[in-house]
Every structure is written in structure tokens, then in C-alpha cells.
Image: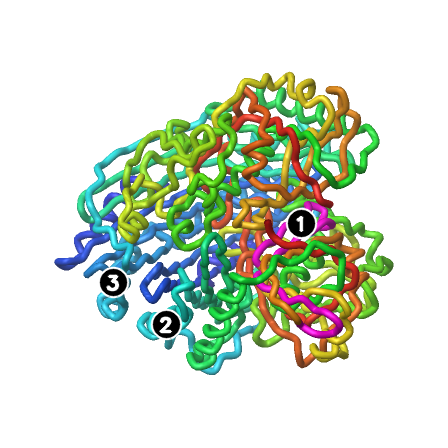
Amino acid sequence: MKTDILSYFKKFSAASFSLLESNEDLAMNLHSEESDFIRFSQSKVRQNTTVQQHEVTLQYQKDQRVYRIKFNLTLDFEQDTAKVKSVLSQLRIELPQTDPSPQFVPIVNNGSSETFKKAERPSTADVIAIIGSTFTDADLAGLWCSGPLRQASVNSKGQFHYFETDYFFFDYSIYDGPRAAKSFYAEDSWNLKNFIEIAQQAKNTLALLKKPSLKIQPGQYKTYLGPMAVAEVLGLFNWRALSQSSFKQGFAPLKKLAEKETLMSDKFTLVENLNLGYSTPFNSLGEIGPKELVLIKNGHLDNLLTSTATATEYKLESNYADPSESMRSPEVKPGHLKEQDALKNLGTGLYLSNLHYINWSDIQTARITGMTRFACFWVENGEIQGPIQDMRFDDSLFNLFGKNLIDLTETQHVYTDTATYLKRSLGAMKVPGMLLQAMNFTL
Amino acid sequence: MQTEFDRYKKEADFVAFKTIHERTRDFGVRDGKPDSLSEFDDQGLLIEVMRNGHMGYSATCETTPEGIKQAFAQAIAMTDASSKYPVFKFDKQIRPGSKGKYQTETKKSLDSLSLAAVYDYLKKTSLALKTSDQIISTSSDAMIITCKQKYLSSAGADFEQSFDIVINSMSATAQKGSETQTRSLHGGRGNCRQVGAEHFQLDSALRECDSISREAIELLSAENCPSETCDLILAPDQMLLQIHESIGHPLELDRILGDERNFAGWSFVQPQDFGTLKYGSPLMNIVFDPTVSDELASYGFDEIGNPAQRKYLIQNGILKAGLGSLESQMRSGLSGVANARSSSWNRAPIDRMANINLEGGDLTLDEMISKVENGVIMFSNKSWSIDDYRRKFQFGCEYGKKIENGKLTKTLKNPNYRGVTVPFWNNLVGLTKPDSVETYGSPYCGKGEPSQIIRVGHSSPYALFKNIEVFGGG
């Protein structure tokens, strides 16, 4: 019989807190998932993996010192609590030999909450059959992921925040030789009609790629970035660009924006929007910050993500960012461009559905480099001329979201977080497409 | 585990149990004070089953008899459902019955290192990096990893592997006015290898601190790397990324077979290229070698029991073999290596790099520099990007020097270069001698769906390339 994780975690955490001595505090995070991962290649199953993973992180605090230890619950109560006893014994001896932390935040009770969400879906065995039959006429590669995911933040001061969701996504691309179209399906509730419609859209896109590919010379081109391409660029903002701690330590690509030496376009507004509902309402400390935190408003930097630890170290005000100081639920506000008019408004230039492998090329000027990927076209007079051979771009965020931003689409798309490194990730981003007066291509 | 394995070993066409217990202590000190002191004690079981020629997996941290029973039932159910739509029907040859042991050679156990001892080392080095008021931030970090694997299979495999690893990084960030520059010990987490507690030698680390700090300050007043096409010398701590991205990944057979297309990408290498493609100049000799004693990805067996062996991937510039496990070798009919690896107990093994090394040449570094009329030498990776076919790359380094008329002249900041894989490697015109080879690696090679981070090693001499496009910041 399967163990009820919430009940077990309540019992385990209470038992762990009872082991504390005076002047000791303990915070505890849970990440628990029961995941089905089905990896597809050539529209068939390459690998199937089911995962039962229940990871707890103990944050032990005493005398301004902090130590975090993470391990997996076996769900054998005696064994799991024995592990906590052993950890506490070790830390009582070792931790006093380090120095107090300049980022020390006392553990406090940030309240309690329990949230439950569930997306209705077919069994994974049925999904395998549906995907197999839907793409018999295509060469597909991708990943089906589904199952419950639970996160909790509790502590010895009485805090107990718990979030449980059960969701799915199918992240895939289809191929005609080297030509490829990217697609993605996730919904609050499985809908076969929608699944097939989205699959057909990908097949239609792939058909557009049948024209001979064109080699575009390096240079500056008017460019439309589809929403998935914008999502890729937004990922760079999450690579320390909006972190207060990184900023203070000299990793500050948006320094010129912060110091008002430059501005981005007044059409560009970036918000951490927890109202999207894809991430926990609490951060890993259990703090509940504002539902919406404006980061960049009409081209001005309004806020950097500032965790309570960073606020303590630098004597600033916390905006209850997660200690990682990365966005959990970013939204780029829409513009006025109609998505169906993207080609017409582009006129002549590049239509890029996806970008790939973006990295900083010069942090001080917020310059980034990356590649075009999947369905990318050369367009003339609003008509697709043919797919392009992959191109490398190298341009500044101050150009892309600044002087070269013509408009954003009025339609936004939501992409749930598909990251599965070490474990599944919660969160999502909501982004429109972007029309740029120029984008710089170098190779 | 033996008892539980015996209970299930006849319940499918093939059954294997792999346990992993990995302890990672990750300590960071910033500006002489604790930044993050943490630990991950990761333990779990991966069950492999073969049904109807299809391999399926179930992973669990519930290592109780009841947890294993449930995980095994899930493995059977999902593998049965998946086996109706298999990419390939395998046979049992993909899982050899290997027996044996592998253990990192160490002089002093990593378990002998206390938190206090490591903290003291990191604090002293972090403080030593602060040599000037222009240094605004210093960091000194160490990841100390002990990993134990055990594999039992119904084919008779029974092997254990034990790895001891240290990943040690230091960096200093200098600032003057609007200029900020960071210099580190061989770039990010490049300084990593299998080693014991003897790694931590404070005297030599303090000398490194002095050099890192001095060069960070030097970069504040340096010129930007010029934009031009010229000769380029790459130091081993940049070559590690060049080898990794433009040789390692494109030679992975599962990429060539198309499994990675939706995530990490495909490859420009075609199956018919093996044995014929002139990947680089005749100076280029690349080996897959998990048998080196102290490199980051050394082992005795890959994670499905294929014994590790050294093998040329590229010899005298000609592509010879790919990075394909027994599964990919059976699917493709191509020659491969022992490289089925997974990031932990909760992911299935896939084709990965291990140690991918470039062999040395016949020059001293001074001789190499003397051959350059106009060029740049670059050290320590800080930026990397390459396309999904592994053709067009752009890399950035921390520190550069201009070379004029055979001599090092001024320091250059923000040195970057870009190129296309095969033409780039065919422009290789010089390598320093084998005794100049330096060994680094990366603990963060990402790949796979679901995604996996794995450790890889790369050793290389200094390498000279002709006619490369270099440029700076701004």
C-alpha cells in the first residue's frame, strides 16, 4: 500500500523538531515526486523511467550559523528519523567551528497553507498509445512527463506550507530530415482534440520548411521572435541578471539600467507574477511575498530580486525572492501586435520560432549570443521564402528590449517549466512574441 | 541489496539492480565569511528490466522491501506498455556479466576532512584573494564528493565502484569605475579531478590566489581584445570546453541516432563519416580514456557493465569512432566505447562523455608563441555557446594576451572567438609537448530527457590555431 506523503511528512517533521535542543532551530523543505518519464525517438519509445523521489532539506541554525543537508526519505520512519539524529549530532560538534553567517536570517513562522491541484489525464500507458498513433506519419523526438509533485516549507517555529500538484507536459519536435518544428502540449486538463490540433499545427509548420533552405549572410536584420524564442531570451534574465546578490558581487549586466545610464523600451515590462499559479505561493523559506513584483516597468528597472538573506547582508529591504534570486513565474506584458499579422508587420526579415544555447558574451554591456533553432524562415514582403540555415546572433539586451523593440504581440503564451535536471521543476513563464527593428547576426 | 535482487532477478527477461550512494559536501566562503555550507546525501536504487527486447527503468529512494516491490511492479508495467512501441528490439548482449571493483587512487581519505578543516582552507584562500581595495568580492569553494555504486544483474554482473572527487574553485572580482572583471582558478568549476584529501595544499593555493587577484586587477586597465582574424593559442583551461563542445558532444552516437534532437540537439556527424571524415589537422589525436588514474570521469566499468578501455576517437585528424554504448552500437552498427552513464540512481543510462583528451605535440609553449607573428592567447573559459548540430560555436575567456612578432605583449580583456567546428580543427597547427598537458573537467555536462548532469574530464596541451576570428567586449 502506498504511503500518504503528506501524512508521513507531518509525522517526520514533527519528530525531527522534537529532537532539537534549546537555541537550535530547524527549517525543512520537501520535494517529492512520482514521475513517469517517457522518452520518444522516431515516434517510438526510447526509454521509460518511473521515479519515486522524496528529498528533504534540513536547514539547521544555531548561534548565527547555518548548515543545509539534503537526503532522500526511505519512508521507513525509524531509518529516516535516525538519519536526522545523526545529522544533528554531527552538526552540534562541527558547525561551531565555522564563523557566523553574514546572511543569517532567524527562522520565523511564516504561517501555514495547504494547496492541492490536479490535472486530469489519461494513464501513461494510454498516452504512449495515443502519441504512437498520432505521429505515425512523423518522425518525432521528445519527452512525456507526468505525475504528482509536492513541495513543502516547514520549520520548528510552527510554519507548515504544503503545495501538491499533479500535472503533465509533452515537449517534442518533429522532423523531415534535418528540418524540424518544435511543439509543446500541456493543459489544466487533458483534451485529446487540443492535443491533436497542436500536433497538426506542428505538422503544418514542418510542411512550410520543405522549401529550399536559404543561407543568410551575417548582418543586421529586422526580426520577429516567436514566443518560444522570447522565452529562451528571458532565460538569460534568470541567469543572475536580476539577482540583487549577484549585482552586489559585480555580476551586473543590468547595471547601466539600474544606474539609469540607459533605458529599455517603454513597451517592455517584466513582472514576477505568482498569480500564474504554476509555482508554490511560498518561497523555500516559506515566505509569501507580493503576488506581483514588477522588475522592469516600461523600460525602467524597478526591482532586483532581493531575498531576505541578501537584504540582511546588504541592509536592504527584502522583496521575498527565493534565496536563489531567480524568477519563478515571469511574465512579459503584451503589446499591440496581432500574432496573425506577425509576418505582415515583419515585411522583409527573419522569423525565428526558437533560439538555442544562449549565454552572456559580454556581461558589462548585457550582450548575449546564441543560435537560431527549429522553424526559422526568411520572409520577404510578408511571405515566407524558405527556412534559413542556422545562424548565430550576438546582441545586447539593451538593443533587443530597447531601441530595436518595435512591438510585442497582444497574445501571450504560457510555457510550464520543463526542466528535469536532478528533479522536476515547478513554474512557468508567460510571454508574447516580439518584433525587432534589427537583430545582429555574426556567423 | 543482494536479498532483494535475488527476489526479483527471474521476473523479467533481464533484471539489474544498481544502487548509488553519493555524499557531496559543498562549501563556499565569500569575502572570508560563510556563503553556503551544505551537503547532499543522495541514495537510491535503479531497477532495469528487459521485456520483449525493450529496456525499461524504475527508480526509487524507498529502499525498503515494500518500496522495492512497488518500484519493480512499476518497471514491469511501464516497460510492457512501452515495449509495444520500441525504437529497437535489443538482446541481452547489451548487458555484460562483468565482475570487479574500481576505486579512486588516493593518499588520504576524503572522509578524513572535517568541516572545520575545509572551512579554514577556504577562509584563508578567500581572504588571500583580497589583495587590494579594487577587489570587491572573493570566493573560494570546494565540492568534496564520495560516490559508491553497486550493480547486480541476472546476466551475472556483480561490480562495485568507489569514486573520490574534489572540485575546487577560487575567484576574485575587481572593479574600477564602470569596469568590472573576474579572474578565477581555471574558469568556474574547471579545476576538478578524482583525488583524496591530499588535494588541499594551502601553500600552493595561496600562490594561486596571488596570481588570480593580480590578473583580475590587471584586467581593469587592459584593452579590449581586438576584432580581427589572427592566430589563436588556447590554454588547456579553455581547450577543455573546446574539446567538450565541438568534439565530445557531436560524437555521441545517441545524438547521431537522433535521440537528443528535441533537447541538446543532433550532430553534424553522419554514420558514414566514421573512418573517412577529416575532422581536423593531422596533429589532432583525441582519445576516450576512462582508465586514467586521476581524471574526473575515470572508472572501471560503465554503468551497464561494459569494461572501460582507452580508444582513439580521432587519430591523425581522421574520425575513427563514436561515443556510443553497447545499446547505440547495436542500433547503429558502429564502433563505440564503454560510456552508458547516468547522473544518479533516478535516471537511466545514456551515451555520455567520460574523459576525452587531446594528446600533446612537439613544441614548448615558448616555441609556440615564437611562431606567432600576430595573435592572441586566451586563458580560462567564461562563456560558451554552440548550435544544436555542434557546428557554429562562440567561446569567451577571462584573460588574454596579445602576441606580436613572437612575443607576449599587452594584456587583453574580454577575449572571445568564434568558428565552425571542422574548419576550426583543420586550422590546428601546433600543440605543446605531452609534459605540458593539463587536466581539467566539468561537473556540469547537461543532456538527456529527463535531463541529467554528469561529470566529464578533459586534458589538453596548449593548442595553436591559424586564421581565427577573435573579438572583445563592448
Q: Is residue A330 left or right of residue A109?
A: right
Residue A185 rendering spot, x and y as whole percentages: 56, 28
Q: Are marks 2 and 3 on the same chain?
A: no
Q: Nearer the viewer, residue B327 or A383?
A: A383
Three-letter amino acid code at the position of disc 3? Pro
Residue found at the very far left of the displayed protein: A22
CA distance separating discs 2 and 1: 36 Å
Q: Which residues are magenta?
A: B382-408
Mark 2 surroundings: few (<14), some (14-19) or many (≥20) residues within 10 A: some
Q: CA distance from mark 1 to mark 3?
A: 42 Å
Q: Position of residue B225 (x, y in %)?
A: 64, 58
N-terminal of the pair, mark 2 or mark 1, is 2
Looking at the image, residue A97 sits to the left or right of residue B263; the answer is left
Q: Chain of mark 3?
A: A
**Main secondary-structure element of the magenta-colored stretch:** strand
> Residue B112 shows which numbered tag?
none
Q: Which residue is mark 3?
A: A100
Q: What residue sits right under mark 2 in the picture?
A: B118
Q: Is residue A286 left or right of residue A172?
A: left
Q: Residue drawn at (71%, 38%), measured in percent from left and top?
A: A42
